Amino acid sequence: RGYNENTKAIPLISYEGDSFYVRQTTLGFILSQSEKNELSLTASWMPLEFDPADNDDYAMQQLDKRDSTAMAGVAWYHHERWGTVKASAAADVLDNSNGWVGELTYFRVLPVGKLSITPALGVYYYDASFNRYYYGVSGAESQRSGLSPWSPESSWMPYVGLTLKYPLTRNLVLLANASYSVLPDEVKNSPMVDRDDSFTLLTGVSWRF
């Protein structure tokens, strides 16, 4: 609540090597790899944050700041003709939330001429420490702001996504990604949140070397 605009410009790098990869905001070090399976250690950036100085709501301005953080964990990919399954888990290594998140996702790349279409279906898990840091309202914050105190437990959040990639030239590629999530009760019932769902759109242009 209190945000009229939430747009960010983020440089994204993609690289696939024999021993490591970079996939958007995740760096992976491959432990084992075969035709159908890949297991890796990961380091990633969690962009979720809250700055009360950027908010238009007076009550929200009285809350503590929540910082983005770095996550470290593991990721497993299993490839079949019918698509790919990804399972991952990562923990906060900067001690901001002291929480961890998990992901289970199915996706499949569908080439249509030059256009690449990748639908995805998955679910995220957020533990109680993660949810309390980003969506909780402490007793002290409640007294300052007038918002009700909130101490959420762990939650599961399903989502659907769609990624489109289209090469304009040999090196220049247009890309777009849209994802839609239904917020769990632990998040949508927070006094910091004023909606039941979340929609994210990423668009950009990439240069392929």
Image (tube, helix red, strand yellow):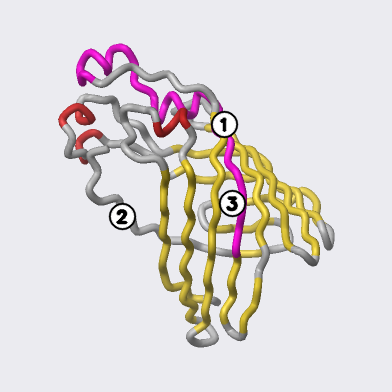
Magenta-drawn segment: 119-146
Mark 3 or 1, closer to the camera: 1
Give residue 116's position: percent from left, percent from top.
59, 75
Which is nearer the eye, 191 or 206?
Answer: 191
Type of the residue with mark 2: Thr
> Disc 3 or 1, which lies upstream in sequence?
3
Quarter-of-image position of residue 192 = top left
Q: Is residue 136 magenta?
A: yes
In three-dimensional space, the C-alpha distance between marks 3 and 2, rounded to whole angstroms, equals 23 Å
Q: Is residue 99 magenta?
A: no
Residue 7 is tagged as: 2
**What crowding class fits label 3: few (fewer than 14 Cα within 10 Å), some (14-19), or many (20 or more)?**
many
Element at badge 3? strand
Type of the residue with mark 3: Leu
Give residue 173's position: percent from left, percent from top.
49, 78
**What crowding class fits label 1: few (fewer than 14 Cα within 10 Å), some (14-19), or many (20 or more)?**
many
- For disc 1, the marked residue is 100
- For disc 3, the marked residue is 27
**What crowding class fits label 2: few (fewer than 14 Cα within 10 Å), some (14-19), or many (20 or more)?**
few
> Disc 2 or 1, which lies upstream in sequence?
2
